[in-house]
């Protein structure tokens, strides 16, 4: 069984694959103050609750955009599960040709998403990841990672609004009944949700203009279920794309990479 781990700025999303099938997965809060022991106990308890034996784990792979936590999680996996994880970097063989000026600047989660999407669809792609930041990645049908766009995430934008505007209170990030809000809460919800959907559609349209052709647009990340349906550009939601990519890159590193499927 393979343990896959995506360490993000807000959440750690991780799961366990058993014979190419995701047996279980979890989303926990990212906390750089937690020790390897605390994470070890948390992970072990969640595995036990899912009736997954630690002894069945044979490998692990990590994607991390939180350098301060990467070493802690590596130590935890070695100490509690006797696993030396593969850590995804810009040097990892993803099967893509990287056209970014400085590949070391690319977040490992973006590389993992791009690799997963390309090997799954094999066509011109734009991957939109709704996380702490919202990232857009452009991948060609020939497997070239061209680059992309980074924008503040929806939660960051909402928190900035509430912090800087004294009279505006936090609201639940849900779809309002109408675009024209009839109270302060629905007005904020409309501005955040529909305004952000407009941002996504505009960025995708501009990226396609520069590509000179349309692309298949995939949405992923924790907020994809809230935002993707409000856009006109996103054609497919792949909520677990990063975990799928981690499994694929691990198999690739082991020399057992599967054949790609196409839509």
Image: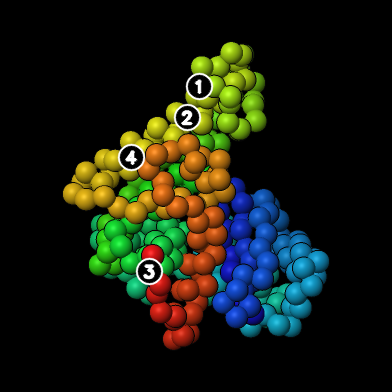
- Tell me the distance, in whole angstroms, between the alpha carbons under discs 3 and 2: 32 Å
**In front: mark 1 or mark 2?**
1
- Give the mark nearest the N terminus, 3 or 2: 2
Q: Which residue is mark 2?
A: 194
What x and y, as percent, mark residue 246? 51, 69
- Tell me the distance, in whole angstroms, between the alpha carbons under discs 1 and 3: 38 Å
- Give the mark nearest the N terminus, 4 or 1: 1
Q: Secondary structure beneath disc 1?
A: loop
Task: Tell me if I can see residue 40 in this picture.
Answer: yes
Q: Is residue 46 left or right of residue 263?
A: right
- Tell me the distance, in whole angstroms, between the alpha carbons under discs 4 and 1: 21 Å
Q: Nearer the viewer, residue 96 or 212?
A: 212
Which mark, by number, is residue 262? 3
Do labels 4 and 3 touch, CB within 8 Å? no
What x and y, as percent, mark residue 112? 44, 64
Give the vertical position of 146 relative to 96 (above or below): above
**In front: mark 4 or mark 1?**
1
Q: Which residue is mark 4?
A: 203
- Tell me the distance, in whole angstroms, between the alpha carbons under discs 4 and 3: 26 Å
- Tell me the distance, in whole angstroms, between the alpha carbons under discs 1 and 2: 8 Å
Q: Which residue is mark 1?
A: 179
**In front: mark 4 or mark 2?**
2
What x and y, as percent, mark residue 67? 53, 58
What x and y, as percent, mark residue 45? 80, 66
As drawn, the residue found furthest toward the bottom would be 255
């Amino acid at each position: 069984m393979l343990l896959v781990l995506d360490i993000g700025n807000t959440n750690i999303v991780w799961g366990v694959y058993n014979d190419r099938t995701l047996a279980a997965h979890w989303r926990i809060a990212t906390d750089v103050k937690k020790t390897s022991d605390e994470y070890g106990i948390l992970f072990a308890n969640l595995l036990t609750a899912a009736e997954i034996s630690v002894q069945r784990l044979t490998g692990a792979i990590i994607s991390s955009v939180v350098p301060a936590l990467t070493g802690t999680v590596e130590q935890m996996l070695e100490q509690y599960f006797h696993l030396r994880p593969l850590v995804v970097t810009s040097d990892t063989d993803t099967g893509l040709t990287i056209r970014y000026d400085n590949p070391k600047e690319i977040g490992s989660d973006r590389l993992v998403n791009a690799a997963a999407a390309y090997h799954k669809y094999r066509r011109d792609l734009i991957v939109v990841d709704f996380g702490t930041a919202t990232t857009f990645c452009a991948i060609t049908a020939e497997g070239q990672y061209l680059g992309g766009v980074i924008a503040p995430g929806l939660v960051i934008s909402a928190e900035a609004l509430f912090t800087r505007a004294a009279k505006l209170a936090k609201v639940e990030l849900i779809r309002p009944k109408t675009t024209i809000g009839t109270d302060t809460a629905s007005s904020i919800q409309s501005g955040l949700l529909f305004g952000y959907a407009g941002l996504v559609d505009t960025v995708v349209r501009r990226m396609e203009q520069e590509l000179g052709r349309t692309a298949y647009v995939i949405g992923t990340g924790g907020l994809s279920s809230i935002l993707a349906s409000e856009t006109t550009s996103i054609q497919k939601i792949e909520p677990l794309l990063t975990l799928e990519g981690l499994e694929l890159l691990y198999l690739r590193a082991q020399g057992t990479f599967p054949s790609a499927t196409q839509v």
